[in-house]
Image (tube, helix red, strand yellow):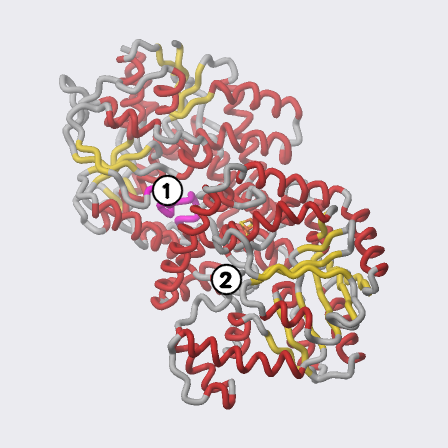
């Protein structure tokens, strides 16, 4: 299949390894990856902060860039939720543009979060990965409650050979990131993060993974600040790792 | 803007007693409500039905309200229309004075809190006594409620004992902090009030247009006393609470207790229609309050806010509420529902920090018995905060810059280049432990990752060139 990658602005600038991992997994599975250079940001930060007119500009840009794609894959649960769940709101209530609304609705069924593409579009549970580490999985709120991915990502992890997968207690609770919430309500966000870290540390895992680098930037930033010795790694990087070519 | 949510939350976050109370209580109630909602095979259908009834009622609100008025009057009651809080206060004060009394008993007072009735009564020389146990505790302590259904959730029993000793006269003397003793003292104290008071003021959970029936549900029975013993009953209700048909109660009397307290049925469900000779109050007044509600109704996205049946389930699952506590919301409506309803009632200039008091995790939307999409309404209200000019100037500037950066690939490349250069000053061990304000909120508890030398785009383009 011809897959168009929307990398997301955070991954592009701060976590390029995640993008490289996605490319490696998809190509290993025999798909052709395209990266439209006109892409920038889905507009989530502007949208969630209330800058809806700016967000509409980014919706239009996204639609122009991707509307002809066969499948659009996004290695971020929150950006996928933005495109599928919030673009219609912006088109309808902010832009008040029927044409744009139709365009985003027609595009939505071709937009996939990375793990969702593997499990639901391709019907895979084993992607041939090898990752000999003790890992716990944080299901992001968007994965659970916007995209309803359920156990999909965990199924992929369970089929990784060599992995020691441990369940994260209280897994349905938010980590406290919430975009600009982490800055505007830094103290409440910190209290939520502290509990999340306590649960992660209780598993004895060396790595905490998730399908979203924004949660992981927040969780990983806290784990690093506390010198816990635990790090965060995006799900795609675990799935990219093989016995022949382990992911660094 | 008055003190904002983050400032008030800071107090709650440091209050170890409250943190413990809330974590324990919300955790218990989450378990109970999850169990009794899961056991009903038609729970999802009930939620849909609840939502549909509210939609129908609000789509023809004028019709149903007029029908309600007609039926209440037919049954011997009186109906008063209050456009705002001031009008509602003056109606209730006048009715109380007309009854020739200087004290009233109260139950289910959320709406009376909204209109700030108690200070108005006191100013008129009338003493209000709250009779819901927790409301009474909060009133005695001269505090504000911190939970929709458990208003004194922030207090422990030693604090309550001391309060009763100080405030209850003979009933409080030598009191222990054992819950049965505390309840017994409250009971003795309140019975006296029930017997000697002529006027009761209540809220209402529902009113049925078809029959003119008004309803209050509660757990203690103190409400039942208030609704039946006094000679005059004044009930105040937001106009959004009207239900078209009596049968609609069958949906809400199932939804509410299961979502609220995790009970299958509410212990006391009081329904009354007008007045009856020889039974209950001699006089019944229903005050219908708008106070901003018709404005909320006019907002296509936010109008769902008015579906709320005040079950408090959204508070009990909210990770922000659990930690920041109810007082951070500076309102009788706390938690996720407070974060959307208060700014709409008071205006975004005054309460503009509330729509931001959420990580948008969606736990509230997932459990709300009438399926209010709270995260969507929060984001919608944030849009109004920005559009109406209540966002910080610095933030607006930064967002504008970011929008231009993302609007133009060249500008984005240039910004990344500048960022890599700038971060050299702040970098330690490959991460940034400190960022300047306003980003210093981030580095309060988190390192920030350094920008890698090569972006994904750079890597991709190099790869394509090969
Ligand atoms: S918003 Fe929903 S969950 Fe929250 S109190 Fe209202 S009805 Fe209950």
Which x, y percent locates residue A9? 40, 31
Q: Indicate whether B60 appears above or below A23.
A: below
Q: Chain of mark 2?
A: B
**Dot 2, how many residues are within 10 Å of its Cα: few (below 14), some (14-19), or many (20+)?**
many
Q: Which mark is residue A172?
A: 1
Q: Looking at the image, which residue is at 30% across and 32% down?
A: A15
Mark 2 beta carbon near ligand 1 (under 8 Å): no
**Dot 1, how many residues are within 10 Å of its Cα: few (below 14), some (14-19), or many (20+)?**
some
Q: Looking at the image, which residue is at 54% across and 63% down?
A: B219
Can see residue B313?
Answer: yes
Q: Indicate whether B37 appears above or below B204.
A: above
Q: Which residue is mark 2?
A: B147
- Compare residues A195 and B108 and report the one nearer the observer: B108
Label 1 secondary element: loop
Q: Chain of mark 1?
A: A
Mark 1 beta carbon near ligand 1 (under 8 Å): no
Location of the C terminus of chain B by quadrant is top left
Q: Looking at the image, which residue is at 46% across and 42% down?
A: B39
Dominant secondary-structure state across the stretch colored magenta: loop
Q: Is residue A177 magenta?
A: yes
Which span is picked out in magenta? A171-183
Which x, y percent locates residue B435? 33, 50
Gap between marks 1 and 2, in whole Å? Answer: 23 Å
- Compare residues B384 and B121 and report the one nearer the observer: B121
Q: Which mark is residue A94?
A: none
Q: Looking at the image, which residue is at 60% across and 83% down?
A: B192
Q: Indicate whether A211 appears above or below B360.
A: above
Q: Quick check: B437 left or right of B428? A: right
């Amino acid at each position: 299949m011809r897959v168009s990658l929307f990398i997301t602005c955070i991954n592009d600038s701060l976590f390029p390894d995640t993008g490289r991992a996605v490319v490696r997994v998809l190509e290993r599975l025999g798909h052709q990856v395209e990266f439209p250079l006109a892409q920038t940001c889905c507009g989530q930060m502007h949208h969630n902060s209330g800058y809806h007119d700016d967000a509409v500009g980014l919706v239009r840009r996204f639609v122009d860039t991707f509307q002809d794609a066969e499948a659009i894959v996004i290695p971020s649960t929150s950006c996928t939720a933005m495109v599928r769940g919030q673009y219609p709101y912006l088109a309808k209530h902010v832009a008040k543009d029927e044409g744009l609304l139709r365009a985003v609705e027609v595009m939505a069924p071709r937009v996939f979060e990375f793990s969702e593409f593997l499990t639901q579009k391709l019907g895979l549970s084993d992607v041939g990965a090898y990752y000999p580490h003790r890992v716990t999985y944080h299901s992001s709120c968007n994965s659970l409650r916007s995209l309803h991915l359920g156990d999909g990502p965990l199924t992929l992890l369970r089929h990784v050979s060599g992995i020691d997968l441990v369940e994260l207690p209280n897994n349905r609770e938010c980590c406290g990131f919430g975009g600009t919430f982490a800055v505007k309500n830094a103290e409440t966000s910190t209290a939520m993060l502290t509990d999340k870290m306590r649960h992660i540390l209780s598993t004895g895992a060396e790595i905490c993974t998730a399908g979203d680098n924004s949660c992981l930037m927040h969780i990983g930033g806290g784990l690093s600040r506390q010198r816990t010795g635990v790090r965060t790694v995006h799900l795609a990087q675990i799935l990219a790792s093989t016995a022949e070519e382990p992911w660094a | 803007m008055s003190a904002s949510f983050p400032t008030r939350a800071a107090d709650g976050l440091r209050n170890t007693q409250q943190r413990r109370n809330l974590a324990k209580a919300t955790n218990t109630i989450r378990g109970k409500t999850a169990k009794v909602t899961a056991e009903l095979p038609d729970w999802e259908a009930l939620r849909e039905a609840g939502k549909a009834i509210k939609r129908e009622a609000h789509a023809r609100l004028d019709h149903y309200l007029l029908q309600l008025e007609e039926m209440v009057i037919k049954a011997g009651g009186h109906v008063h229309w209050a456009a705002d809080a001031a009008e509602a206060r003056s109606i209730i004060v006048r009715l109380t004075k007309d009854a020739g009394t200087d004290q009233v008993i109260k139950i289910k007072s959320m709406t009376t809190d909204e209109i700030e009735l108690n200070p108005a009564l006191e100013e008129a020389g009338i003493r209000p006594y709250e009779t819901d146990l927790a409301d009474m505790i909060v009133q005695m302590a001269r505090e504000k409620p911190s939970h929709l259904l458990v208003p004194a959730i922030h207090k422990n029993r030693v604090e309550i004992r001391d309060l009763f000793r100080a405030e209850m006269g003979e009933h409080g003397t030598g009191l222990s902090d054992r819950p049965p003793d505390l309840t017994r003292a409250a009971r003795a104290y309140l019975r006296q009030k029930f017997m000697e008071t002529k006027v009761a003021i209540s809220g209402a959970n529902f009113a049925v247009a078809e029959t003119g029936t008004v309803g209050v549900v509660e757990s203690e029975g103190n409400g039942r006393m208030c609704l039946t013993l006094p000679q005059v009953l004044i009930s105040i209700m937001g106009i959004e609470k009207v239900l078209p048909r009596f049968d609609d109660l069958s949906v809400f009397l199932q939804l509410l207790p299961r979502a609220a307290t995790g009970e299958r049925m509410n212990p006391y469900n009081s329904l009354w229609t007008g007045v009856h000779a020889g039974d209950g109050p001699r006089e019944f007044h229903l005050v219908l309050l708008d106070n901003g509600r018709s404005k909320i109704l006019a907002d296509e996205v936010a109008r769902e806010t008015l579906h709320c049946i005040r079950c408090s389930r959204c508070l009990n699952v909210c990770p922000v509420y659990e930690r920041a506590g109810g007082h951070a919301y500076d309102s009788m409506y706390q938690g996720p529902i407070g974060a959307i309803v208060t700014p709409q009632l008071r205006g975004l200039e005054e309460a503009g920090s509330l729509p931001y008091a959420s990580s948008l995790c969606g736990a509230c939307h997932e459990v709300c018995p009438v399926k209010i999409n709270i995260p969507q309404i929060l984001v919608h209200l944030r849009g109004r905060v920005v559009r109406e000019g209540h966002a910080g100037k610095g933030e607006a500037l930064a967002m504008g810059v970011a929008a231009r950066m993302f609007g133009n690939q060249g500008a984005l490349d240039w910004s990344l280049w500048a960022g890599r250069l700038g971060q050299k000053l702040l970098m330690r061990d490959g991460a940034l432990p400190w960022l300047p304000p306003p980003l210093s909120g981030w580095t309060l508890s988190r390192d920030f990752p350094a920008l890698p030398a090569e972006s994904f785009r750079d890597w991709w383009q190099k790869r394509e060139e090969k």
